[in-house]
Image (cartoon, rainbow, N blue to C red):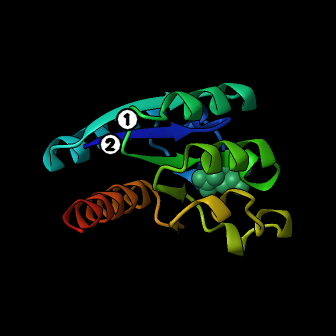
Amino acid sequence: MKLLIINGPNLNMLGIREKNIYGTETYEGLLNYLREVCEAEGIEASFFQSNHEGAIVDEIQKAYGVMDGIVINPAAYTHTSVAILDALKAVNLPACEVHLSNIYEREEFRHHSYISAACLKTFYGMGFAGYREAILFLRDHCLKEMST
Ligand code: DQA
């Protein structure tokens, strides 16, 4: 099983940006954590981080016919991007949305996600563990699909 794991703008600044919200672990730390999770589950993962909306759209399009699912933390684009929503709808791959923080307990503009409409489930407020939950959810979802 092949998963594309996408991180949006400023997530490369983990460990530096707003540590009180996002913690002290770095983006490299997140990747190491995700590599371990995927290895333990026998999942082949491809990682992508960009600060650019179009680059994220391009990467989602490239996943068509190649990947079995997408885990995405769209970061600030969560609250603005119809283009990322449309790209996810276009490739129609099972997808999960992840947020490190609890976006529903933060500023009101973070309460709405454009991306949720193209995702099976959203995991939020769990830090790195939210990505693990999303990976396991997609693994179970794909196994179920294969057996029906
Ligand atoms: C975030 C939440 C977003 O509102 C914010 O813009 C981010 C990170 C999270 O992981 O909690 O950059 O997606």
The amino acid pointed to by label 2 is Leu
Q: Residue at x 73, y 27 (%)?
A: 54
Look at the image and tell me whether residue 32 can be seen: yes
Q: Is residue 21 left or right of residue 135?
A: right
Circle 1 packing at 10 Å, graded few (<14), some (14-19), many (20+), is: some
The structure residue drawn at horizontal position 34% and vertical position 56%, both measured from the top left corner, is: 132
> Residue at image x 74%, y 32%?
53
Q: Is residue 20 visible?
A: no
User: Can you identify the residue that label 2 sits on?
Assistant: 34
The residue closer to the viewer here, 108 or 97, is: 97
Residue 137 figure quarter = bottom left
Residue 51 point in image, percent of width and height: 69, 28
Identity, as a three-letter code, of the amino acid under mark 1: Leu
SS at circle 2? helix
Query: In the picture shown, does residue 83 fall above or below 118?
Result: above
Whole-percent x, y for residue 101 in the image: 59, 61
Q: Is 136 on the left-hand or right-hand side of 72? A: left
Judge whether 34 appears above or below 137 on screen: above
Question: Could you say which is closer to the camera, residue 12 or residue 145?
Answer: 145
**Which of these two is toward me, 98 or 100?**
98
Question: Where's the C terminus, which quadrant?
Answer: bottom left
What is the x, y in percent for residue 97?
A: 55, 57
Disc 1 designates what residue?
31
Question: Does the CB distance between marks 2 and 1 fall below 8 Å?
Answer: yes
